[in-house]
Image: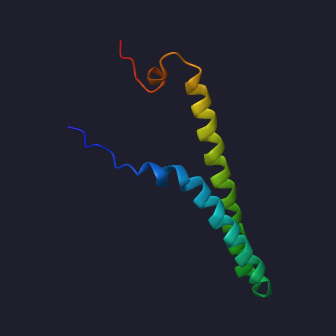
Amino acid sequence: MERPGRHLSRPLYEGLPWIYMASGVLTLLGSYWLAAHGALSLIVGLAGLVALVGGFVVLLRRRDYRELRSQYADPDALSREDKP
């Protein structure tokens, strides 16, 4: 018997890419403020860049998936596994 997966609430799920991007921007600003600390600033800056790009990628992938899904007459057929 399979256990159902845990799901996030819809408002939180829809806001995740924006949360990732906002945290990335804030982390990049923190990196700018830590400029005198060389290596620490670089590590924080890279983490901010990863968060920013990751949020943007998630946002675009969701948009593309929803657009693809809207082009089909039966959108649920995309997520079904047909077994012969």
Residue at point 36%, 16% (across, down): 83
Where, by quadrant of the figure, is residue 70 drawn? top right
Residue at point 63%, 46% (across, down): 59
Task: Compare residues 49 and 83 and report the one nearer the observer.
Answer: 49
Name the quarter where the N terminus is drawn: top left
Where, by quadrant of the figure, is residue 22 drawn? bottom right
Name the colouring of the figure: rainbow
Name the quarter where the C terminus is drawn: top left
Q: Position of residue 4 (x, y in %)?
A: 28, 43
Residue at point 70%, 81% (across, down): 40
Which residue is farthest front? 11
Task: Compare residues 52 and 70 and report the one nearer the observer.
Answer: 70
41 to the left or right of 84: right
Where, by quadrant of the figure, is residue 3 drawn? top left
Residue at point 68%, 67% (across, down): 48
Q: Position of residue 71 (x, y in %)?
A: 59, 20
41 vs 65: above or below = below
72 vs 37: above or below = above
What count of labels does the image hold?
A: 0
80 to the left or right of 21: left
Which residue is farthest top? 84
